[in-house]
Structure formats: structure tokens, C-alpha cells
Image (spheres, rainbow, N blue to C red):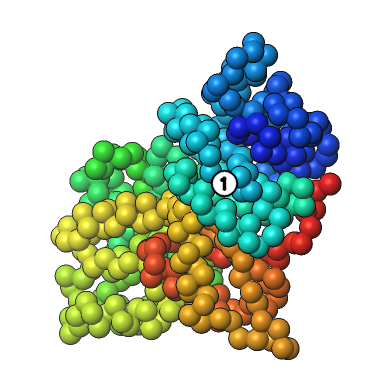
């Protein structure tokens, strides 16, 4: 189970925060300096993720008695065994030299660190929490263990650490689903990458009936190409085999890291309704994508700029996806397509530090606030990135029902201008900030 060690100097509220996260009173809370000496553990569940939290004794490098020295050793052991360290500080006292010494120790340990600035019981103290950025860790949350303020955002960030170790992080092999309508050149593309005739290629559409995995190494990376059956218009599916081929193609998209969607540049209808449905499916599954305009060497009476504008006019919801013009037959643009795929993979795993994310979002929000509804206007408090693949950001507001679809699109577009996220869907999740903590 993923382990989170709660550390910090004595009397900053580690045990109070431990009890708040655990949802019950386990650790003794008292103002006595250095009261906690042993490690105390509890299992926590949040948003379907389970992890273990460990309360530790306060770290004091200037200790003279054996008991405190043993507590320090116990804390260092907990840090070494934890995947994530929650560094607790006191906003009322501000950053002190001992906080800096502990931060330096954690950097040497090479751990993922989240800073919880405790005792932020009002808005003025929440603003003062920004002074702790000097400790050098991007993920920082102002919280009040006593009153439960900021706990939801902190729990989301802790759960995101588990996502980072699980399904949201890429495995050692990058899985790429090659998809598109029949006869757009999917198997020819795979053969070109492999530099051999591995897949059967024929002018008759529907030659490939099943999804086939082919492993290859390119640019020092292990890659699995998933050649799929051509996606037909559902009304045109007549044979049972074609129905199962469509089902397997969708399954291949779901288990892939991203998709290369091919379009035939020589077909008169250009982007078809089936292409739009396929693109929408890729988007809804949260997969990254590169659009490959194949057979470009055979295209006539058009240029790249006009064709690109045409594609985005047909699929406005997909305008964050890069286009690569290529020819699987001649090899034109093939290497560029791989470079673009690797780039999109990086964009899917991009994480934005909490301070930078909040600064940018506040500027975006202030430039153009959401329209009022029934005399009420949505107020934005803070945000945190809670996941990758696709990148997911949670925004805490006063009332999420006041945020309309148009405004969400505005925020997504502005975040893309600020941070890129090219080729990957960007998920925004809104939560109402609670006045009181939900945990006793």
C-alpha cells in the first residue's frame, strides 16, 4: 500500500492533521513540545484510492536526550519507507531555519514531498502560506487541521500521488493504437515502421479483421504498435466479424496510451462522420492522439494550411491534436509522426506545480469571470492538478453549478495557451469548497 509519512518539527500540528486525515482521533494532540515519539499508522481511503499515513515524532536536530534522538531515528526510518512525505509547517510562526533543514534532508532523500502549511484558519493566513514556497517544493497547501479547511484539496493531492504510481503513469512500453477507417493505410504504416512486410496490405478494405500487437524499439524506447481493423460506419456493418472488429478496435483504444488516427488525404469526402465519431471516442476515453494525414504524396489541389483549417472546422473539439502529413508508402513524414507521438506522450504526463497553476488560473479568472446566474457568480479559490494521462485539474469554488460549459471551454483553452498540453485531453473537475471539514 502507498505510504505517506507526516513529518515536521515539533508542535506544528502533525498529530492533529493525522487525526483529521484518518477521520478519527488516534494520535494524542497536546501542546507539549515533542509529545509524539513513536510512529502511528492508519489506513485512509479517498476517491477510491487507499493509502497508509504515518504520524511521526517532531524532528529536532539539536537534541540532547536519548528519547528524542530515538524519535528522530524513527522519523528517518518512516521517511525511508514512504513513497510520499507530507511536510507539516506552522503558518503562524512562518518559515523557520529548522523547516529549511528538514526540507534539505527530504531533498537528499529524493522523496515526493507535499507541504501542508497548518493553522491557516482564515483568508489572511491562507495568503501568508505562500511564504513557505521558499522551502523549494512546488506542491503546497494551506490547511487547518483544527477546522478542516483545505483538507479536501490536500487529500486529492495525496490520492494523485497514488495515481502517479498506478494506471495514470505510462508503463515501460508505450502502447500506440493505429486507428482509422478501412483502407487508410494502417497496416502500411506499421510495415513502414518495422521496415518489413509484417502486416498483410491489400487495396480491398477490411483486410485486417483483428487487433494485432507488434513490439518495436524506436529512439531508445520500447513501443507496442496496435494495428486495428478499419472502423466502419455502424450502419454499414453486416457481418458478425465486422461487429467484433469494431468492438476490438475500441478495446485497443482503451488499453493504449495514445492513438495515431489516420485520415486518407485522397478521399473526396475528407473527414467523414465516422472519423468524427472515432475522434470523439478517443477524446472521451481520455487518450492522447496524433492525426496522421496519410497518402499526402497523392493529394492534389490543396496545401497543408488549407487542409489543416478544414480538419479543425470539421472537428473543433479536437483542435488540440497535432496533424502530421505523411505517406506510409513512400516514408514521407513517418519519423516526424513518431517524434510527435513521443512529444504527445510527454504532454500527457505533464505536471504543473500548484503555485504556478494557481497564479495562472487566478489571472485567467480575473481577466474574464463567469457570467452571473440568478444574481450569483462563481468564485474561484484554488486548484490542484490531481492526475495525468489525461492531465486532470480540480478547481475549488463556492458553487460549481454556476460554471457553464462555455466557461469551462474558455478555461481549458487558456490553460493550453499557458502550459501546452498538446495532443491530450485536459479534464477540469469542479468542487465546492466546504466551510467545515467532513472528517471528525
Q: Nearer the viewer, residue 2 or 261?
A: 2
Q: The residue tagged with tag 1: helix, strand or loop?
A: loop
Name the residue: 70% across, 21% down. 37
Q: Is residue 103 left or right of residue 63?
A: left
Farthest residue to the top: give it.
Answer: 66
Residue neighbourhood size for the residue with mark 1, other residues' Cα within 10 Å, grouped as few (<14), some (14–19), many (≥20):
some
Q: Nearer the viewer, residue 382 or 243?
A: 382
Q: Position of residue 254 (x, y in %)?
A: 52, 54
Picture layout, residue 439 above or below residue 290: above
Residue 238 in sight:
yes
Picture layout, residue 436 above or below residue 86: below
Residue topped by disc 1: 94
Q: Is residue 264 left or right of residue 159?
A: left
Name the residue: 32% across, 51% down. 342
Farthest residue to the bottom: give it.
Answer: 374
Q: Nearer the viewer, residue 118 or 216?
A: 118
Picture layout, residue 178 above or below residue 263: above
Name the residue: 18% across, 85% down. 301
Q: Position of residue 73 (x, y in %)?
A: 59, 17
Q: Nearer the viewer, residue 407 or 134?
A: 134
Q: Position of residue 260 (x, y in %)?
A: 36, 59
Q: Position of residue 252 (x, y in %)?
A: 48, 52
- Marks counted in the figure total 1
Q: Is residue 19 left or right of residue 66?
A: right
Amino acid at each position: 500500500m502507498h505510504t505517506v509519512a507526516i513529518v515536521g518539527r515539533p508542535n506544528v500540528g502533525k498529530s492533529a492533521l493525522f487525526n483529521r486525515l484518518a477521520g478519527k482521533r488516534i494520535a494524542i494532540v497536546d501542546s507539549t513540545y515533542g509529545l509524539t515519539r513513536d510512529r502511528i499508522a492508519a489506513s485512509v481511503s479517498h476517491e477510491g484510492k487507499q493509502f497508509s499515513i504515518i504520524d511521526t515524532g517532531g524532528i529536532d536536530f539539536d537534541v540532547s536526550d536519548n528519547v528524542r534522538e530515538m524519535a528522530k531515528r524513527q522519523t528517518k526510518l518512516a521517511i525511508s519507507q514512504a513513497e510520499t512525505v507530507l511536510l507539516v509547517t506552522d503558518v503562524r510562526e512562518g518559515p523557520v531555519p529548522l523547516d529549511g533543514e528538514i526540507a534539505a534532508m527530504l531533498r537528499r532523500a529524493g522523496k515526493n514531498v507535499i507541504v501542508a502549511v497548518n493553522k491557516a484558519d482564515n483568508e489572511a493566513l491562507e495568503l501568508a502560506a505562500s511564504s513557505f514556497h521558499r522551502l523549494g517544493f512546488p506542491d503546497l497547501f494551506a490547511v487547518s487541521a483544527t477546522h478542516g479547511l483545505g483538507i479536501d484539496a490536500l487529500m486529492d493531492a495525496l490520492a494523485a500521488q497514488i495515481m502517479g504510481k498506478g494506471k495514470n503513469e505510462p508503463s515501460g512500453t508505450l502502447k500506440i493504437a493505429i486507428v482509422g477507417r478501412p483502407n487508410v493505410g494502417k497496416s502500411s504504416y506499421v510495415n513502414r515502421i518495422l521496415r518489413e512486410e509484417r502486416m498483410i496490405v491489400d487495396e480491398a478494405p477490411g483486410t485486417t479483421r483483428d487487433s494485432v500487437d507488434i513490439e518495436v524499439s524506436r529512439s531508445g524506447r520500447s513501443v507496442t504498435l496496435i494495428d486495428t481493423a478499419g472502423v466502419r460506419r455502424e450502419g454499414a456493418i453486416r457481418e458478425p466479424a465486422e461487429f467484433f472488429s469494431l468492438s476490438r478496435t475500441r478495446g485497443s483504444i482503451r488499453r493504449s496510451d495514445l492513438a495515431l488516427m489516420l485520415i486518407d488525404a485522397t478521399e473526396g469526402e475528407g473527414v467523414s462522420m465516422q472519423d468524427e465519431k472515432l475522434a470523439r471516442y478517443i477524446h472521451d476515453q481520455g487518450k492522447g492522439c496524433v492525426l496522421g494525414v496519410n497518402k499526402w504524396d497523392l493529394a492534389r489541389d490543396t496545401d497543408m494550411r488549407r487542409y489543416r483549417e478544414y480538419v479543425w472546422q470539421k472537428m473543433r473539439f479536437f483542435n488540440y491534436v497535432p496533424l502530421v502529413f505523411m505517406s506510409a508508402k513512400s516514408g514521407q513524414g513517418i519519423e516526424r509522426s513518431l517524434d510527435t507521438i513521443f512529444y504527445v506522450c510527454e504532454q500527457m504526463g505533464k505536471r504543473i506545480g500548484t503555485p504556478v497553476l494557481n497564479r495562472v488560473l487566478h489571472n485567467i479568472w480575473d481577466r474574464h469571470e463567469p457570467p452571473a446566474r440568478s444574481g450569483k457568480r462563481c468564485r474561484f479559490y484554488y486548484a490542484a492538478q490531481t492526475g495525468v494521462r489525461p492531465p486532470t485539474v480540480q478547481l475549488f469554488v463556492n458553487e460549481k453549478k454556476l460554471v457553464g460549459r462555455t466557461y469551462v471551454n474558455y478555461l481549458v483553452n487558456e490553460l493550453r495557451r499557458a502550459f501546452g498540453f498538446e495532443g491530450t485531453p485536459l479534464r477540469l473537475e469542479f468542487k465546492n469548497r466546504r466551510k467545515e471539514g467532513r472528517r471528525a
